[in-house]
Image (cartoon, helix red, strand yellow):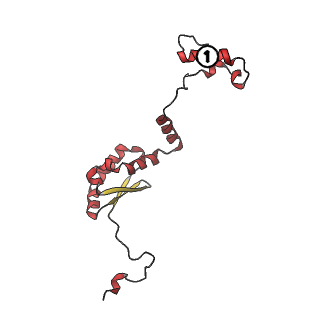
Amino acid sequence: MIEMETQSESSRVYLRLKKLFGASRTSRKAKRDSESSEPYGLGREPKGVAEVLTGLATELGWNQTLAQSEILDSWPEIVGPDLAAHSSAISIQEGVLTVGCDSTAWATQLRLLREELLSRILETQPESGITELRFRGPDVPSWKRGLRSTPGRGPRDTYG
């Protein structure tokens, strides 16, 4: 048995109660060596929730997915409030982050800042796997799709 001075108080209390109340029962646990299941021993410390979830995410391979979702959620913090007012992170597919912009002028401006934005992203979330940024301007309406679309030039052919 381990010396009494090296054990913590909680370990001594546990072992004393185990000796008083647990020795008369015969079970699988009682048949085991009492020193092998010492409470609060090395490797038996309780862990925090954050540590457990981080270990689980690493074990299941979720780190990249979680980092990518963090980029989508924290886009205003990454680019700043001025650029975030005119752009938003839309999606990430195969390492390509697609950013939607209010106008084609803002899409052009963000294209000029591409390298700086990519380095900020890699600083904040290096596990995200982002390798490229694509900037889209606003979507224009299409007359070629929809429930009542017809072949031909579209609504322009009815004007005189």
Q: Height in image: 129 above or below 18?
A: below
- The extreme front residue here reads 21
Q: Can residue 46 be seen in this view?
A: yes
Relative image position of residue 150 (x, y in whole percent): 43, 82
Where does label 1 land, which residue? 15
Horizontally, residue 6 falls left or right of residue 153, namely: right
Quadrant showing the N terminus: top right
Residue at image position (59%, 13%) is 2
Give the percent coordinates (x, y) of residue 26.
74, 21
Q: Of 145 and 13, which appears nearest the observer?
A: 13
Identify which residue, 45 or 126, lies in the foreground: 45
Q: Where is residue 43 in the image (x, y as percent from the top left)?
A: 54, 26
Horizontal and vertical percent position of residue 79: 30, 50
Q: Which residue is drawn at 48% across and 32% down?
A: 48
Q: What residue type is labelled 1?
A: Leu
Dot 1: element: helix
